[in-house]
Image: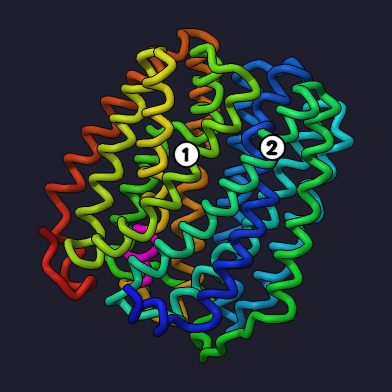
Amino acid sequence: MRSKILSLDRNIWILSVNSFFTDFSTEMILPLFPIFMDRFLHASKSEIGFIEGLAEFTVAILIALSGFYSDRIGKRKGLAVFGYGFSNLIKPLAFFADSMMFLGLVRVGDRIGKGIRVAPRDALISQSTSKKISGFVFGLSKMMDSAGALIGSLFASLFLFYLGNSELTFRAIFLFSLVPGLISMAILIFLLKDKTFTPSKEKLFRPSELPFEFYLIVLFQGIFSLLAMNYSFMILKAQDNGMSLVIIPIAYAVYNLFVSIFAIPIGSFADKIGKATMLSFVYLAFGLSAIFINLKIEYTTWIAFVIYGFVGGGFNALAKAIISDLTPVHFKATAYGIYYGFVGVCTFLSLYFAGIIWDNFGSTILFNITISGSIFLALLLFLNRKIWQDHAGLEEL
């Protein structure tokens, strides 16, 4: 472990610390958005699902475009800085939100920034590591994300505990998110160094430039995203189970704590046994998490958030490591753009229809669908795990 850490490229650490402060800023407010919409703006579950889904759809489109553009110009840093800056400056505007449309614009605006930065950032991380430790590196990045999210969630809980759960407290939290956001921007602007490469001479991307195994893992991740609940509906389900408003950010902090705990071990273990193998366990874990939260018992809701932390620690990190192993340097950002784009569209559809199902049939049926679907997909991925073994440089178990 120590030798891995000492051998890491400087940019990996800079991007990881930047992610810590960005998620500190973001996760102060994200777990409060669905509650704010539900309690103070009186939104239906369908409306919340549509806003969250639209935000993810926006990310999907922009990541694809940003990734392609980054590969064409042969640069990463400028797009990453602009994307982080846009998000961190627009999130605090939620302080002024007086309608679903205004808050929706802030939410989508934050995702616009993410859409611009993610593909070039992940490509920069990928350029700075090797196949042998790609799982570890993306696990480290996810751990720092979630450590920031943990601190942000705890700050939100402290605000609610000491100032009360009024609408004014929510708005104060939204405004305070500007502070860690500005720190993250300064880190990128002054410390990050770009890694140049020779762009592809092709003016248009051809799907054949990327291998079949890449598209297959994207398909698996997209289908899983159609079936799985993201944090918004996990939070709403916890509230539906009777968890108090002040406690919910703590439950979300528990989730991020366990994302941080699991992220590096998941990545390191995946480097040894195979990333696709480990990803199938992540799918299975989500089914287990949904089972526990669907029991509607307080202590099983806490267990659900712990297991959900395992899912969060591995879902995107493992897929990004697999993509890193599969793709040439001049198509890395394009590949990440395609991946996030497809998964984002699937997440949009998932959130939108999840809201409709909840409003019309209840949350129990909704979560029963996700349980059966995720367990089936876990089995299917495990049975086909050897497809990715040659690119990983090891035997999938």
Q: Quadrant of residue 273?
A: bottom left
Q: Residues within 10 Å of mark 1 (few under 14, many from 20)?
A: many
Q: Is residue 125 above or below residue 58?
A: below
- The majority secondary structure of the magenta stretch comes to helix
Question: What's the residue type where badge 1 is placed?
Answer: Tyr
Q: Residue at x 17, y 40 (%)?
A: 379
- Distance CA(mark 1)–CA(mark 2): 14 Å
Q: Is residue 358 left or right of residue 297?
A: right
Q: At which x and y percent is residue 175?
A: 83, 43
Task: Determine whether 123 is above or below 114 in the image.
Answer: below
Residue at the farthest front position: 162
Element assignment for label 2: helix
Number of labels in the image equals 2
Give me the residue at 40% from left, 51% from top: 261
In this view, 32 is above or below 81: above
**In-front residue for pair 300/12:** 300
Write down the region rendered in magenta: 318-324
Q: Compared with residue 343, is residue 16 higher up or lower down, i.e. above or below? A: below
Residue, disc 2: 156
Q: Quadrant of the N terminus?
A: bottom left
Please rate how many residues cluster around mark 2, counting C-alpha atoms within 10 Å: few if below 14, some from 14 to 19, many from 20. Answer: many
Q: Is residue 129 left or right of residue 167?
A: left
The local secondary structure at tag 1 comes to helix
Q: Which mark is residue 353?
A: none
Mark sitting earlier along the chain (1/2) = 2
Give percent across and percent down for residue 6: 41, 82
Residue at the location (65% across, 77% down)? Answer: 77
Q: Amino acid at mark 2?
A: Ala
Q: Which residue is mark 1?
A: 255
